[in-house]
Amino acid sequence: MKILYTNFHQGDGGGHTTYVMSLARMLRQRAQITVAAPRSSRLLAEADALPGVQSIDLEFKGRPFQQLTALRRLRALLRKEQFDVIHVNGSADHRLCMLATMGMGAKRPFIVLTQHTDRTANSLGVRMRAKWGTNRVICVCGHTFRRMKDSVFRDEDLRVVHNGVDTTQFRPASARDAEQARAALLPAAMRRRLVVGSNAGTASYKNWLDMVAAVSLLPDPLRDQVVVLIAGKEPDDGQRQRVAELGMTHQVVFTGLLEDVRPFLSALDVGFVLSSRLETISFACREMMAAGKPVIVSKVGGLTENVTDGRNGWVVPPGSVSSVFKTLVEILQNRSLVAQMGIDARNTAQREFSLAQFVGRTEEVYLERPTGARSQLRLTS
């Protein structure tokens, strides 16, 4: 099978990069894999370094002339390689792939879209892509599936495939490794505190400032026991100003973007993902749980499909600083909860977040393409 993965994100790419590279690493032994992404993207750099994977630099966004050039390059690539499957991961790459495959007839590849967010899928552009550029839609959680059933995509083309993580790579650290991780990331005075952190990034909708605000409300004796650790793109000036206004400058540590988040996870006691919108299943949440960390999540998107409140983490209403505050007080008053819930988080990850299961079910979607010839897209809504 010949598979083309596409993604339009420049720079880090977050969960999209993790998603595509997880599939590419696992499937390259039994399929011919090509990854097309912008030259400046982390995805292209990682794909280029992966043996057995072909990487193509392609800009899916730009001015009309640039897009026309990209369209011609993509169409030439499709004719040359004759892919069985094109797996798209965003609106911009989906649109260009739709245009590039028009008129290919029986040689047209089977086009699979992964819906990574819970954005409304009913715009004119989405309607066009649903009608002329999609054979199957992978929904990364039950929440996304329910949202997509109310969209312009055909119900019979929707499939639920939960994102998976490598639980052999993401696993609980030894006491020594955890101590070394804290020594590398935190000032000496902070290493014995409760470390509450997130590798979900610093985008505003991730609501990480809600955690900072909640810690700032703790009485001094409790507040001095906590440090907030954040991995991801450096915060902007407005976000840093808000941290300062909360009096938390010396209790929040930013690591910046990390090539390997495992030492970061080792340093944590408790994870959090407090998104207010757009969130689906969250690779970050699943990685923290696989590393044996209980996670505080907001009741948004598919986050509650990971966490059972009171068992392997805590569920709070989105945007509720007071609920996060109460959860922190509960944790600080009974620190033994953290270890117990971390064990359950790890067990949940091993049972439900299998990378092999994720890749296998994705491959099953690819195998739904008609045999003996490439797929014809339905031209009726």
Image (tube, rainbow, N blue to C red):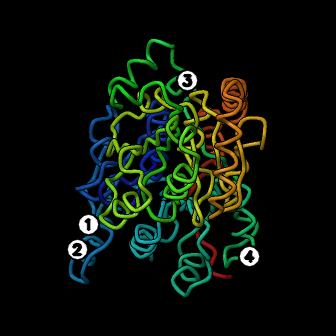
Amino acid at pointer 4: Asp
Q: Earlier in the sequence, mark 4 or mark 3?
A: 4
Distance from Cα at disc 2 to Cα at disc 3: 45 Å
**Camera-side residue: 81 or 345?**
345
Q: What whole-number distance in Å separates the C-alpha atoms at marks 1 and 3? A: 42 Å
Task: Please give the name of the residue rendered at 70% of the width and 44% of the height, measured from the top-left corner.
Answer: 306
Q: Secondary structure at mark 4?
A: loop
Q: Earlier in the sequence, mark 2 or mark 4?
A: 2
Q: Nearer the viewer, mark 2 or mark 4?
A: 4
Question: For numbered disc 2, what is the local secondary structure?
Answer: helix
> Residue 238 appears at what percent x and percent y?
34, 67
Considering the image in quadrants, where does the C terminus appear? Answer: bottom right
Mark 2 or mark 3: whose residue is earlier in sequence? 2
Q: Please state if 256 lies on the left or on the right of 99 as rendered.
A: left
Earlier residue among tags 4 and 1: 1
* Helix, strand or loop status at disc 1: helix
- The image quadrant of residue 377 is bottom right
The image quadrant that residue 76 belongs to is bottom left
Of residues 356 and 288, the one nearer the viewer is 288
- Of tags 2 and 3, the one toward the viewer is 3
Nearer to us of marks 4 and 1 is 4
Q: Amino acid at mark 2?
A: Thr
Q: Residue at horizontal 46%, vertical 49%?
A: 3
Name the front one of labels 1 and 3. Answer: 3
Q: Which residue is mark 2?
A: 69
Q: CA distance from mark 4 to mark 3?
A: 37 Å
Q: Are marks 2 and 1 in contact (CB under 8 Å)?
A: yes
What residue lies at 36% left-to-right and 50% top-to-bottom? 249
Q: Which residue is more in the foreground, 37 or 171?
A: 171
Which residue is the site of mark 3? 171
Q: Which mark is residue 150?
A: 4
